[in-house]
Amino acid sequence: MGEDLEKLKQRLPLLDYLRQQNWCGRPAGQGTEFVGLCPLHPESRPSFYVNARKNLFYCHGCGQGGDLIRFVELSLHLSFPQSLAYLQQQGVPAGAADAREQAAVFYQQQLPRHPEALRYLERRGVHDPALIEELRIGYAPGGNLRRHLTNQGYSLESLQRDGLVHRQGGDTFYRRIVLPCGQHREVVNLYGRSIDAAFPHRFLPGPKGGLFAWDLVRHFSTLILVEGLLDLAVLWQAGFRNTTCAFGTHLTPFQFHQLSEQPDRVVYIVFDQDENQAGQRTAHHLARRLVGVSVPPRLVQLPAGRDPNSYFVAGAAAADFADCLEGAHPL
Ligand SMILES: [Zn+2]
């Protein structure tokens, strides 16, 4: 778990967390207490009190009370360990998100200047300039981020701590397409996808956040879940805007909670059709878990050896993919 409980509660005060969740409270009495409508039960007159000094809440309407962890348990229906895991993913240390945001902006500016990066995107079927802009796709040529950020006042130590610069002092990302992963409009992590086969794809240290672009997709009544950001990119480009991604096949408890928060939502799982069946096995496992929480899953079969990205790159059109969705079987 890493971070200890008290430190976590200090880093993320209950009142700040509630405000991030759009809770409106007004001061009640002596300054450190706030009152507003209870987020845990329907009510028309405020009975939910937060004591900012004690970092505790109590609702006179439903009788619930406790600390930040308790609030997350109750509001998201998570167990204690799940709530902890969720909170540890909320936000990154002060300053890191900021530096990562600046890095994302810088990498975006680099992209059009490097034909090798544009050629790579083209090869991976990503060509719509509006989509590239929307996903904030950038390019790290390597060797120029550190200077750029230290000129902006970031210390070398902080950049190393955030993972943007490695221990030897060079840029972590080198010849990589970079995609920011955001949460609450904050860059939580950066995904660096090597344009040469030699280097593995990687994230910066720390959490990757929830499901990709959750704020944009959560209102859809059907969702398409894919493994990777380049799968997502070609699907968005083809008009399947209800696609999200968990950055791999194993969902964190929080990502699973997001996926299952609405019981009637149909979830299409489109993992890679690899030869060793690993993607299919994890897809099955996830589908069974979704059934367990009354979310109807559909397992989507692509032609052998394909993932959504390579399927489109090989020439599939939106109608072909729609056929695959149609042919998907419930568990
Ligand atoms: Zn209440």
Image (cartoon, helix red, strand yellow):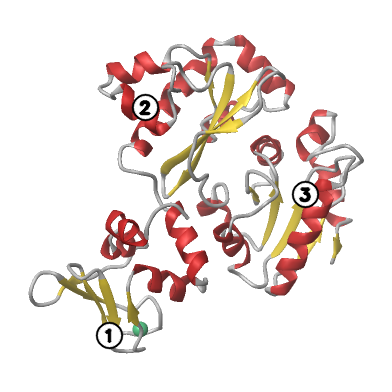
**Residue hosting label 3:** 270
Q: Are marks 2 and 3 in contact (CB under 8 Å)?
A: no
Q: Secondary structure at mark 2?
A: helix
* Residue found 48% across the figure and 23% down from its top: 108
From the image, state whether disc 2 or disc 3 is nearer to you. Answer: 2
* Residue found 70% across the figure and 49% down from its top: 249
Residue 159's disc number: 2
Label 2 crowd bin: few (<14), some (14–19), many (20+), radius 10 Å: many
Q: CA distance from mark 2 to mark 1?
A: 47 Å
From the image, state whether disc 1 or disc 3 is nearer to you. Answer: 3
Tell me residue 309's x, y (percent).
Answer: 76, 35
Q: Is residue 46 among what the camera can see?
A: no
Q: CA distance from mark 2 to mark 3?
A: 36 Å
Label 1 crowd bin: few (<14), some (14–19), many (20+), radius 10 Å: few
Please report whichever mark, 2 or 1, sits nearer to the chain's N-terminal start: 1
Kind of residue sitting beneath label 1? Arg
Is 207 above or below relative to 315?
A: below
Q: Secondary structure at mark 3?
A: strand
Q: Secondary structure at mark 1?
A: loop
Please report whichever mark, 1 or 3, sits nearer to the chain's N-terminal start: 1
Q: Is residue 147 among what the camera can see?
A: yes
Disc 3: residue Cβ within 8 A of ligand 1's nearest atom: no
Total marks drawn? 3
Please report whichever mark, 2 or 3, sits nearer to the chain's N-terminal start: 2
Of 135 and 2, nearer the camera is 2
**Residue hosting label 1:** 45
* Residue found 33% across the figure and 81% down from its top: 65
Kind of residue sitting beneath label 2? Leu
Tell me residue 29's x, y (percent).
Answer: 9, 77
Q: CA distance from mark 1 to mark 3?
A: 45 Å
